[in-house]
Amino acid sequence: MNSPITKLADGRYIVSQMVGTGGMADVYLGLDTRLDRQVAIKVLRRDLAKDPAFVARFRKEALAAGGLNHPGIVAVYDSGEENDSPYIVMELVNGQTLREKMQTQSISLPRSLEIIKGILQALDYSHNQGIVHRDIKPGNIMITNTGDIKVMDFGIARVTDDMGATMTNTWNVVGTAQYLSPEQATGELADGRSDLYSLGCLMYELLTGQPPFTGDTPVSVAFQHVSAPLIPASQIKPTLDTNLDRMLAVVLAKDPKNRYQDAQAMLADLENVIKGEPVTTKIKKVVPRRKLLSIGVVAAVLIGLGYFALSPSATPLKVPNVVGLTEVEARVLLKDFNVNIQHAPDAQIPVNRIASQLPLATSDAKAGSSVTLTISDGPGNTTVPVGIIGLSLEEARYKLTAAGLLISQTIATDSDQAPGVVLSVNPVPGTTITAGNGVILEIASGNVQVPALVGLSEINARTVLTQAGFLIREITASDPAKQNGEVLAQAPEAGATKTIGSVVTITINRN
C-alpha cells in the first residue's frame, strides 16, 4: 500500500490516501467501484503481516464485526488479502472519535448521557450476538458529523463461547489500562460485564473530566482497577446527580457478579436518570450460561469419578506481573497464590520493591500454588549463589536475579548435557561481589529458534525470551501510533536459528 492509488480484489476497490493509523493497521480512503460508494479500507501493516498471530487476530476482527448489523456499530462489508496483506473493507464514517471530541471541547451532561446510551445500545446488540468487544474506550467510539454514535474496532473481540478468551498477558494491555476491567487485568475470562465496566470508566471520565483511576504506569493503573476504592463522581463534580453515583458504583464493581448483568439493565437505569427519575440498580444474581455449561460438564465428570465437590485449583491461572510493586500491592494481586518472600541486594530496583518473581509473569499456575518474590534491599554486596551448576539457563537466571546479579555473558560449549545446562560459573559460587554485577556462565551448546516478538508487550517478550533460553538486550525508540511498551523490532528476526544463551535485542516503544 505504498503507492497513492492501489486496486484490490481484481479492481473492485480503489485505494487512495491514508486517513488514519493504529497499532495493527493503516486505514485508507477507498471506493467500491461495483456499488459506487466510498469505503474505509483497513490494511494490516506489512511488518505485522509476516506474523501468523497478527494475521489470525486481524481475520478474527473481520469475522467478529462482519456478522454485526446495527446502526451503532461501524459495518464491515468485505475482507480479503492482496500481496500477502490482509485487508478489511468497512463503512466510511465521517466524524471524530470521542477521544478527539473530549480533547477539544466540553461535552454537556445531557449529551454525555446520550453518548453512553448509544454505546449501550450497540453493546446490547453485540452481546446478544455472542460478541464481546473487550476494548471499549473513547478512541474506539465515533461521533459522526450528524451526531450519531458508532462503536468500532472489534480487533480484540472474542466470541463469548470461546472458553479460552483470557488475556494472553496480565499486563499486556489488550484493552487500554484506564478502561481495563479487573478480570482482564488479572487474566480471567472477559464477558459482557467486562465491556460494561470499561464503559463505566468512559462514563466516569465523561462526567468528571478524569478517569476513575490514574497512575504513572499501566501496571499501577491496572492494580487500582483490581483493588483501589472508587471515588464517587459527585466528589469531583458536586453538581452531578447522586443517581449517577449509584449507577457508577454498580457498573464499576470489582466483582462482575455485583455489576449490571447485561446492557439492558444498565440502559433501564440510564433512561431513569435521563428522565429525572431514581435508579433501581437491581442486580439480578445469575450465573452466566457459559459457566453453567462448564460447571455441568465438570460436575458430570467428577460424579462419574466418585467425587462430590468441585476443586477450584483445577483451572490454571495467569500469574500477574508484580515486579516493581511493594509487597502489600503484590499480595493483593497474588491473592489466589501462596506467597513466599525473600530478600536480596539489587542495584536497579528501589528498596522494598519486588525485584523478581518465580514463576514468571504470565506463566500458568494453579490456585494455591507458591509464588516466590525477591524484595530489593537496595545496592550492596551479594554472594554468587551455590547450586547454579547443573541448572537450566532459565533456572540459573532466576537464582542469580534473586541474588541481585545479572548474566553478562554465556559461552556455549559442546557437552553431553542437555542444551542450556550450566557447566561452570565465573566468578565461582560463594564469591562476594557488588549487587548488579554480571556473571559469566558456560552452558551446554544447542540451537533454538528465535521467537516472534514484534507487537508483544515488553513483559510478554521478556517472558517468551527467558523461557526460550535467550539473553535479552533492550533499546528504546518512540512511535506515537503504538502502545507504550510494545516491541517495535527485534534482532535477530523471528525464526532465525541461534545458539541457546545468545543475545536477542528488542526495541521497546517509549512514548
Image: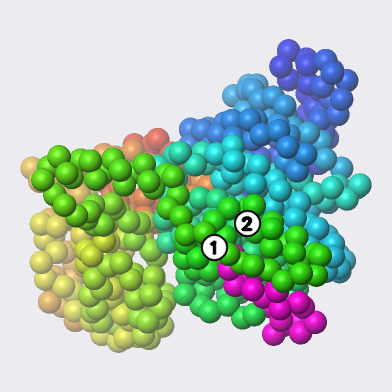
The answer to whether one can see residue 56 in this image is yes
| Residue 16 is inside the magenta segment | no
Please give the label number shown on residue 265. 2
Residue 457 position (above or below residue 292): below
Residue identifier under label 1: 283
Q: Residues within 10 Å of mark 2 (few under 14, many from 20)?
A: some
Q: Position of residue 113 (x, y in %)?
A: 78, 62
| Residue 236 is inside the magenta segment | yes
Mark 1–mark 2 Cα distance, whole angstroms, equals 8 Å
Q: CB of mark 1 within 8 Å of CB of mark 2?
A: yes
Residue 359 position (above or below residue 9): below
Would residue 88 be found to the left or right of residue 390 on screen? right
Q: Residue furthest left?
A: 416
- Front-lying residue, 420 or 9: 9
| Residue occupying image coordinates x 80% and y 82% | 239
Would residue 507 be found to the left or right of residue 239 on screen? left
Residue 119 position (above or below residue 375): above
- Front-lying residue, 109 or 186: 109
- Front-lying residue, 440 or 38: 38
Q: Position of residue 307 (x, y in %)?
A: 13, 49
| Magenta part of the chain | 233-251
